Amino acid sequence: MLQNGWWLVTSLYMVVDAGLSPAQLLVIAAVQGVASSVFEIPAGVVSDTIGRKAAIVTSHALMAAAMITTGLSSDFLPLMVAQVLWGIAGTFASGSDVAWATDEIDQPERMHLLIAAQGRWQMIGSGAGIVVFGALATILNRPAAIAGAGVLMLVLGAWFTVAFPEDNFVRVRKDHLRVALGIARRGARLVVTDRTVCVLVIVTVLVNGAGDSFARVYPVQLSGLGLPSGMSGTVWFTAISLAGYAFAVLALAVAQNRLHDDHGARAALALSCATGLISFVLVGLAPNLTYAIVGVVIANGIAMPLIRTITTIWVNRRTANDIRATTHSFMAQAEYVGEIVCASSLAGVSGAMGAGNTVALAASLFAASAAVLALARVRGADPTSVAHASPVGGGAT
Protein backbone atom coordinates (compact mmCIF):
# COMPACT_ATOMS: atom_id res chain seq x y z
CA MET A 1 0.00 0.00 0.00
CA LEU A 2 2.75 2.47 0.99
CA GLN A 3 4.79 1.75 -2.12
CA ASN A 4 2.05 2.02 -4.72
CA GLY A 5 0.36 5.07 -3.24
CA TRP A 6 3.73 6.77 -2.82
CA TRP A 7 4.68 6.01 -6.41
CA LEU A 8 1.52 7.60 -7.81
CA VAL A 9 1.88 10.74 -5.67
CA THR A 10 5.60 10.96 -6.48
CA SER A 11 4.96 10.74 -10.22
CA LEU A 12 2.57 13.70 -9.95
CA TYR A 13 5.02 15.54 -7.70
CA MET A 14 7.93 15.25 -10.14
CA VAL A 15 5.81 16.46 -13.05
CA VAL A 16 3.56 19.10 -11.42
CA ASP A 17 5.48 20.42 -8.41
CA ALA A 18 9.12 19.84 -9.37
CA GLY A 19 8.41 20.69 -13.01
CA LEU A 20 10.79 18.10 -14.44
CA SER A 21 10.94 17.97 -18.22
CA PRO A 22 10.21 14.79 -20.22
CA ALA A 23 13.96 14.51 -20.93
CA GLN A 24 14.76 14.65 -17.21
CA LEU A 25 12.10 12.04 -16.42
CA LEU A 26 13.55 9.71 -19.05
CA VAL A 27 17.07 10.22 -17.68
CA ILE A 28 15.83 9.33 -14.18
CA ALA A 29 14.07 6.22 -15.50
CA ALA A 30 17.20 5.12 -17.40
CA VAL A 31 19.57 5.66 -14.46
CA GLN A 32 17.18 3.90 -12.09
CA GLY A 33 16.91 0.94 -14.47
CA VAL A 34 20.67 0.61 -14.75
CA ALA A 35 21.13 0.76 -10.97
CA SER A 36 18.41 -1.83 -10.40
CA SER A 37 19.89 -4.16 -12.99
CA VAL A 38 23.41 -3.86 -11.53
CA PHE A 39 22.31 -4.49 -7.94
CA GLU A 40 19.74 -7.25 -8.58
CA ILE A 41 22.01 -10.33 -8.50
CA PRO A 42 24.33 -9.08 -5.69
CA ALA A 43 21.25 -8.30 -3.57
CA GLY A 44 19.94 -11.83 -4.11
CA VAL A 45 23.31 -13.31 -3.16
CA VAL A 46 23.35 -11.17 0.01
CA SER A 47 19.95 -12.58 0.91
CA ASP A 48 21.17 -16.16 0.42
CA THR A 49 24.44 -15.51 2.27
CA ILE A 50 23.75 -13.07 5.11
CA GLY A 51 20.02 -13.57 5.56
CA ARG A 52 16.60 -12.88 4.05
CA LYS A 53 15.58 -10.71 7.00
CA ALA A 54 18.65 -8.50 6.65
CA ALA A 55 17.89 -7.98 2.96
CA ILE A 56 14.25 -7.09 3.63
CA VAL A 57 15.15 -4.62 6.40
CA THR A 58 17.79 -3.06 4.12
CA SER A 59 15.08 -2.64 1.49
CA HIS A 60 12.84 -0.84 3.98
CA ALA A 61 15.66 1.50 5.01
CA LEU A 62 16.54 2.38 1.42
CA MET A 63 12.89 2.94 0.50
CA ALA A 64 12.46 5.21 3.51
CA ALA A 65 15.56 7.20 2.49
CA ALA A 66 14.19 7.52 -1.06
CA MET A 67 10.78 8.68 0.15
CA ILE A 68 12.13 11.25 2.61
CA THR A 69 14.67 12.60 0.10
CA THR A 70 11.91 13.03 -2.48
CA GLY A 71 9.65 14.88 -0.05
CA LEU A 72 12.40 17.27 1.05
CA SER A 73 13.61 18.38 -2.37
CA SER A 74 12.25 19.38 -5.76
CA ASP A 75 15.60 19.61 -7.58
CA PHE A 76 16.54 17.24 -10.37
CA LEU A 77 19.69 15.72 -8.86
CA PRO A 78 18.23 14.82 -5.40
CA LEU A 79 15.14 13.39 -7.09
CA MET A 80 17.32 11.25 -9.35
CA VAL A 81 19.30 10.01 -6.33
CA ALA A 82 16.04 9.19 -4.56
CA GLN A 83 14.77 7.21 -7.53
CA VAL A 84 18.05 5.30 -7.73
CA LEU A 85 17.73 4.43 -4.04
CA TRP A 86 14.16 3.31 -4.70
CA GLY A 87 15.32 1.03 -7.50
CA ILE A 88 18.11 -0.48 -5.40
CA ALA A 89 15.68 -1.01 -2.51
CA GLY A 90 13.51 -3.09 -4.80
CA THR A 91 16.42 -5.42 -5.59
CA PHE A 92 16.90 -6.28 -1.90
CA ALA A 93 13.20 -7.11 -1.51
CA SER A 94 12.98 -9.01 -4.80
CA GLY A 95 12.82 -12.70 -3.96
CA SER A 96 13.88 -12.22 -0.34
CA ASP A 97 10.28 -12.06 0.89
CA VAL A 98 9.34 -15.28 -0.89
CA ALA A 99 12.57 -16.97 0.25
CA TRP A 100 11.98 -15.90 3.86
CA ALA A 101 8.40 -17.18 3.86
CA THR A 102 9.45 -20.46 2.24
CA ASP A 103 12.10 -21.01 4.92
CA GLU A 104 10.02 -20.08 7.93
CA ILE A 105 6.71 -21.68 6.97
CA ASP A 106 8.54 -24.80 5.76
CA GLN A 107 5.51 -26.21 3.92
CA PRO A 108 6.58 -26.40 0.25
CA GLU A 109 3.29 -28.02 -0.78
CA ARG A 110 1.37 -24.91 0.33
CA MET A 111 3.67 -22.18 -0.94
CA HIS A 112 1.61 -21.69 -4.11
CA LEU A 113 -1.31 -20.63 -1.91
CA LEU A 114 0.85 -18.17 0.02
CA ILE A 115 2.38 -16.59 -3.10
CA ALA A 116 -1.06 -16.28 -4.69
CA ALA A 117 -2.34 -14.65 -1.48
CA GLN A 118 0.63 -12.29 -1.58
CA GLY A 119 -0.32 -11.32 -5.12
CA ARG A 120 -3.92 -10.64 -4.05
CA TRP A 121 -2.87 -8.45 -1.14
CA GLN A 122 -0.48 -6.54 -3.38
CA MET A 123 -3.41 -5.70 -5.64
CA ILE A 124 -5.60 -4.74 -2.68
CA GLY A 125 -2.78 -2.61 -1.28
CA SER A 126 -2.20 -0.97 -4.64
CA GLY A 127 -5.82 0.12 -4.90
CA ALA A 128 -5.99 1.24 -1.28
CA GLY A 129 -2.68 3.06 -1.62
CA ILE A 130 -3.89 5.08 -4.59
CA VAL A 131 -7.02 6.16 -2.73
CA VAL A 132 -5.42 6.82 0.68
CA PHE A 133 -2.33 8.63 -0.52
CA GLY A 134 -4.27 10.58 -3.10
CA ALA A 135 -6.57 11.81 -0.33
CA LEU A 136 -3.64 12.49 2.03
CA ALA A 137 -1.78 14.48 -0.61
CA THR A 138 -4.92 16.51 -1.24
CA ILE A 139 -5.58 17.24 2.45
CA LEU A 140 -1.96 18.09 3.28
CA ASN A 141 0.35 18.49 0.30
CA ARG A 142 2.35 16.14 -1.88
CA PRO A 143 5.80 16.72 -0.27
CA ALA A 144 4.42 16.13 3.25
CA ALA A 145 2.61 12.95 2.16
CA ILE A 146 5.74 11.65 0.42
CA ALA A 147 8.08 12.33 3.38
CA GLY A 148 5.50 10.97 5.81
CA ALA A 149 5.42 7.72 3.87
CA GLY A 150 9.18 7.46 4.39
CA VAL A 151 8.77 7.73 8.16
CA LEU A 152 6.07 5.05 8.08
CA MET A 153 8.37 2.82 6.01
CA LEU A 154 11.07 3.13 8.69
CA VAL A 155 8.52 2.16 11.36
CA LEU A 156 7.42 -0.79 9.22
CA GLY A 157 11.03 -1.97 8.86
CA ALA A 158 11.59 -1.72 12.62
CA TRP A 159 8.39 -3.67 13.27
CA PHE A 160 9.48 -6.40 10.84
CA THR A 161 12.84 -6.62 12.60
CA VAL A 162 11.24 -7.17 16.00
CA ALA A 163 8.11 -9.15 15.16
CA PHE A 164 9.22 -11.64 12.49
CA PRO A 165 11.64 -14.49 13.20
CA GLU A 166 14.35 -16.02 11.04
CA ASP A 167 14.81 -19.46 12.60
CA ASN A 168 15.26 -21.74 9.61
CA PHE A 169 17.87 -19.82 7.62
CA VAL A 170 21.44 -21.15 7.91
CA ARG A 171 23.69 -18.11 7.80
CA VAL A 172 27.17 -18.25 6.27
CA ARG A 173 29.72 -17.74 9.05
CA LYS A 174 33.01 -17.69 7.10
CA ASP A 175 34.45 -17.49 3.58
CA HIS A 176 31.64 -15.13 2.62
CA LEU A 177 33.07 -14.18 -0.76
CA ARG A 178 33.79 -17.76 -1.82
CA VAL A 179 30.34 -18.93 -0.78
CA ALA A 180 28.67 -15.91 -2.39
CA LEU A 181 30.40 -16.60 -5.71
CA GLY A 182 29.37 -20.24 -5.45
CA ILE A 183 25.75 -19.25 -4.85
CA ALA A 184 25.82 -16.94 -7.86
CA ARG A 185 27.29 -19.71 -10.06
CA ARG A 186 24.70 -22.23 -8.92
CA GLY A 187 21.87 -19.78 -9.54
CA ALA A 188 23.17 -19.06 -13.04
CA ARG A 189 23.60 -22.78 -13.72
CA LEU A 190 20.03 -23.46 -12.66
CA VAL A 191 18.67 -20.76 -14.97
CA VAL A 192 20.65 -22.15 -17.92
CA THR A 193 20.40 -25.91 -17.40
CA ASP A 194 16.96 -26.46 -15.86
CA ARG A 195 14.70 -26.53 -18.90
CA THR A 196 11.60 -25.37 -17.05
CA VAL A 197 13.35 -22.43 -15.42
CA CYS A 198 14.96 -21.52 -18.75
CA VAL A 199 11.53 -21.50 -20.40
CA LEU A 200 10.19 -19.29 -17.61
CA VAL A 201 13.08 -16.87 -18.12
CA ILE A 202 12.20 -16.57 -21.82
CA VAL A 203 8.52 -16.09 -21.04
CA THR A 204 9.40 -13.43 -18.45
CA VAL A 205 11.54 -11.52 -20.96
CA LEU A 206 8.79 -11.57 -23.60
CA VAL A 207 5.84 -10.84 -21.31
CA ASN A 208 7.52 -8.03 -19.39
CA GLY A 209 8.65 -6.48 -22.64
CA ALA A 210 5.05 -6.52 -23.81
CA GLY A 211 3.73 -5.30 -20.46
CA ASP A 212 6.14 -2.38 -20.18
CA SER A 213 5.37 -1.27 -23.72
CA PHE A 214 1.64 -1.61 -23.06
CA ALA A 215 1.80 0.47 -19.86
CA ARG A 216 3.48 3.33 -21.72
CA VAL A 217 1.29 3.27 -24.82
CA TYR A 218 -2.26 2.34 -23.82
CA PRO A 219 -3.07 5.77 -22.28
CA VAL A 220 -2.31 7.29 -25.69
CA GLN A 221 -4.63 4.78 -27.34
CA LEU A 222 -7.42 5.52 -24.85
CA SER A 223 -7.00 9.26 -25.36
CA GLY A 224 -7.16 8.80 -29.11
CA LEU A 225 -10.43 6.90 -28.73
CA GLY A 226 -12.04 9.70 -26.72
CA LEU A 227 -11.01 9.37 -23.07
CA PRO A 228 -11.53 12.81 -21.49
CA SER A 229 -8.55 14.98 -20.60
CA GLY A 230 -7.95 17.05 -17.48
CA MET A 231 -9.38 16.09 -14.09
CA SER A 232 -12.14 13.89 -15.54
CA GLY A 233 -9.49 11.92 -17.45
CA THR A 234 -7.53 11.42 -14.23
CA VAL A 235 -10.68 10.09 -12.56
CA TRP A 236 -11.21 7.71 -15.48
CA PHE A 237 -7.62 6.43 -15.32
CA THR A 238 -7.95 5.91 -11.55
CA ALA A 239 -11.22 3.99 -12.00
CA ILE A 240 -9.68 1.79 -14.71
CA SER A 241 -6.69 1.05 -12.45
CA LEU A 242 -8.92 0.17 -9.50
CA ALA A 243 -11.03 -2.12 -11.71
CA GLY A 244 -7.84 -3.88 -12.80
CA TYR A 245 -6.79 -4.45 -9.18
CA ALA A 246 -10.23 -5.84 -8.34
CA PHE A 247 -10.16 -8.28 -11.25
CA ALA A 248 -6.62 -9.34 -10.29
CA VAL A 249 -7.77 -10.25 -6.78
CA LEU A 250 -10.58 -12.41 -8.21
CA ALA A 251 -8.37 -14.02 -10.86
CA LEU A 252 -5.68 -15.00 -8.34
CA ALA A 253 -8.30 -16.40 -5.96
CA VAL A 254 -9.76 -18.57 -8.73
CA ALA A 255 -6.39 -19.78 -10.05
CA GLN A 256 -4.51 -20.50 -6.83
CA ASN A 257 -5.79 -24.04 -6.25
CA ARG A 258 -4.70 -25.08 -9.76
CA LEU A 259 -1.06 -24.15 -9.21
CA HIS A 260 -0.04 -26.96 -6.86
CA ASP A 261 2.03 -28.83 -9.46
CA ASP A 262 3.90 -28.24 -12.72
CA HIS A 263 1.00 -29.45 -14.87
CA GLY A 264 -1.43 -26.97 -13.32
CA ALA A 265 1.08 -24.13 -13.47
CA ARG A 266 1.82 -24.83 -17.14
CA ALA A 267 -1.86 -24.88 -18.10
CA ALA A 268 -2.60 -21.69 -16.14
CA LEU A 269 0.41 -19.92 -17.64
CA ALA A 270 -0.57 -20.88 -21.18
CA LEU A 271 -4.14 -19.65 -20.57
CA SER A 272 -2.80 -16.39 -19.12
CA CYS A 273 -0.61 -15.84 -22.18
CA ALA A 274 -3.64 -16.41 -24.41
CA THR A 275 -5.61 -13.93 -22.31
CA GLY A 276 -2.83 -11.38 -22.69
CA LEU A 277 -2.78 -11.90 -26.46
CA ILE A 278 -6.54 -11.36 -26.75
CA SER A 279 -6.61 -8.34 -24.44
CA PHE A 280 -3.74 -6.58 -26.22
CA VAL A 281 -5.32 -7.16 -29.62
CA LEU A 282 -8.62 -5.87 -28.24
CA VAL A 283 -6.97 -2.65 -27.05
CA GLY A 284 -4.87 -2.18 -30.18
CA LEU A 285 -7.69 -2.77 -32.66
CA ALA A 286 -10.57 -1.46 -30.54
CA PRO A 287 -13.29 0.26 -32.62
CA ASN A 288 -14.30 2.45 -29.68
CA LEU A 289 -13.34 3.44 -26.14
CA THR A 290 -15.50 0.82 -24.43
CA TYR A 291 -13.72 -2.11 -26.08
CA ALA A 292 -10.35 -0.57 -25.31
CA ILE A 293 -11.16 -0.12 -21.62
CA VAL A 294 -12.34 -3.73 -21.38
CA GLY A 295 -9.06 -4.85 -22.94
CA VAL A 296 -7.00 -2.74 -20.53
CA VAL A 297 -8.82 -4.15 -17.49
CA ILE A 298 -8.35 -7.73 -18.72
CA ALA A 299 -4.66 -7.16 -19.47
CA ASN A 300 -3.82 -5.38 -16.21
CA GLY A 301 -6.28 -7.28 -14.05
CA ILE A 302 -5.96 -10.86 -15.30
CA ALA A 303 -3.14 -11.60 -17.74
CA MET A 304 -0.20 -9.72 -16.23
CA PRO A 305 -0.85 -10.47 -12.51
CA LEU A 306 -1.44 -14.16 -13.21
CA ILE A 307 1.70 -14.54 -15.31
CA ARG A 308 3.81 -12.77 -12.70
CA THR A 309 2.43 -14.91 -9.86
CA ILE A 310 2.58 -18.22 -11.73
CA THR A 311 6.21 -17.77 -12.78
CA THR A 312 7.15 -16.86 -9.20
CA ILE A 313 5.43 -19.96 -7.83
CA TRP A 314 6.92 -22.26 -10.46
CA VAL A 315 10.48 -20.97 -10.08
CA ASN A 316 10.21 -21.10 -6.29
CA ARG A 317 9.20 -24.74 -6.53
CA ARG A 318 12.22 -25.67 -8.65
CA THR A 319 15.00 -24.03 -6.66
CA ALA A 320 16.82 -25.02 -3.48
CA ASN A 321 16.83 -23.03 -0.23
CA ASP A 322 20.46 -21.95 -0.41
CA ILE A 323 20.06 -20.24 -3.81
CA ARG A 324 16.38 -19.29 -3.62
CA ALA A 325 16.67 -15.50 -3.45
CA THR A 326 19.44 -15.50 -6.07
CA THR A 327 17.28 -17.49 -8.48
CA HIS A 328 14.41 -15.04 -8.03
CA SER A 329 16.90 -12.23 -8.67
CA PHE A 330 17.82 -13.80 -12.00
CA MET A 331 14.12 -13.78 -12.87
CA ALA A 332 13.99 -10.09 -11.97
CA GLN A 333 16.96 -9.54 -14.28
CA ALA A 334 14.93 -11.19 -17.03
CA GLU A 335 12.21 -8.60 -16.41
CA TYR A 336 14.71 -5.78 -16.92
CA VAL A 337 16.03 -7.39 -20.10
CA GLY A 338 12.50 -7.68 -21.47
CA GLU A 339 11.69 -4.08 -20.65
CA ILE A 340 14.91 -2.81 -22.23
CA VAL A 341 15.09 -4.99 -25.34
CA CYS A 342 11.44 -5.54 -26.25
CA ALA A 343 10.16 -2.13 -25.19
CA SER A 344 12.96 -0.29 -26.98
CA SER A 345 12.35 -2.33 -30.14
CA LEU A 346 8.65 -1.51 -30.10
CA ALA A 347 9.46 2.13 -29.37
CA GLY A 348 11.48 2.22 -32.56
CA VAL A 349 8.42 1.42 -34.67
CA SER A 350 5.72 3.12 -32.61
CA GLY A 351 6.13 6.48 -34.33
CA ALA A 352 5.34 5.04 -37.73
CA MET A 353 2.70 2.53 -36.60
CA GLY A 354 0.72 4.57 -34.08
CA ALA A 355 -0.36 3.59 -30.56
CA GLY A 356 -3.03 1.05 -31.55
CA ASN A 357 -0.85 -0.92 -33.95
CA THR A 358 2.05 -0.85 -31.49
CA VAL A 359 -0.15 -2.46 -28.81
CA ALA A 360 -1.36 -5.04 -31.33
CA LEU A 361 2.25 -5.79 -32.26
CA ALA A 362 3.14 -6.19 -28.58
CA ALA A 363 0.46 -8.90 -28.44
CA SER A 364 2.72 -11.05 -30.61
CA LEU A 365 5.08 -11.39 -27.63
CA PHE A 366 2.33 -13.26 -25.78
CA ALA A 367 1.91 -15.52 -28.80
CA ALA A 368 5.66 -16.17 -28.76
CA SER A 369 5.49 -16.99 -25.03
CA ALA A 370 2.70 -19.50 -25.61
CA ALA A 371 4.72 -21.05 -28.45
CA VAL A 372 7.76 -21.43 -26.18
CA LEU A 373 5.61 -23.18 -23.56
CA ALA A 374 4.09 -25.50 -26.17
CA LEU A 375 7.48 -26.34 -27.68
CA ALA A 376 8.95 -27.13 -24.27
CA ARG A 377 6.01 -29.42 -23.53
CA VAL A 378 6.43 -31.28 -26.80
CA ARG A 379 10.10 -31.87 -26.07
CA GLY A 380 9.32 -32.79 -22.48
CA ALA A 381 10.49 -30.79 -19.49
CA ASP A 382 13.11 -32.31 -17.19
CA PRO A 383 11.43 -34.11 -14.29
CA THR A 384 13.85 -32.89 -11.65
CA SER A 385 15.61 -29.63 -11.02
CA VAL A 386 19.36 -29.29 -10.77
CA ALA A 387 18.69 -26.97 -7.86
CA HIS A 388 18.19 -30.05 -5.70
CA ALA A 389 21.58 -31.48 -6.54
CA SER A 390 24.50 -31.13 -4.17
CA PRO A 391 25.74 -27.56 -3.74
CA VAL A 392 28.52 -26.50 -6.04
CA GLY A 393 31.12 -23.97 -5.03
CA GLY A 394 30.43 -23.89 -1.31
CA GLY A 395 27.52 -23.86 1.07
CA ALA A 396 26.41 -22.44 4.35
CA THR A 397 28.62 -23.14 7.25
Image (cartoon, rainbow, N blue to C red):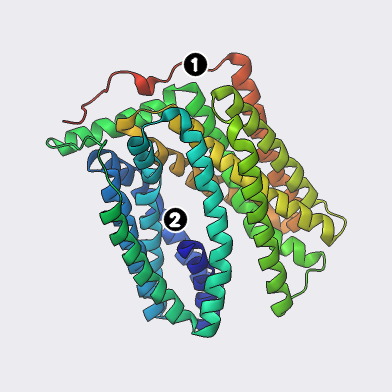
Q: Quadrant of residue 42?
A: top left
Q: Is residue 258 above or below residue 148?
A: above
> Dividing the image into 4 quarters, which one contains the C terminus?
top left
Q: Residue at x 82, y 68 (%)?
A: 226
Q: Which residue is mark 2?
A: 33
> Answer yes or no: do the residues labelled 2 and 1 have beta carbons within 8 Å?
no
Q: Residue at x 68, y 73 (%)?
A: 234
Residue 202 visible within the image: yes
Residue 183 image position (x, y, % from top left): 28, 32
Q: CA distance from mark 2 to mark 1?
A: 34 Å
Q: Nearer the viewer, mark 2 or mark 1?
A: 1
Quadrant in which residue 264 is drawn = top right
How many numbered marks does the figure carry?
2
With respect to residue 313, does 295 lie above or below? below
Residue 236 at what x, y percent from top left? 72, 69
297, 360: nearer the viewer: 297
> What residue sits right under mark 1 in the picture?
382
Q: Residue at x 53, y 32 (%)?
A: 200
Is the residue marked by circle 2 packed among few (<14), some (14-19), or many (20+) residues within 10 Å? some
- List x then y, in percent, for residue 369: 63, 33
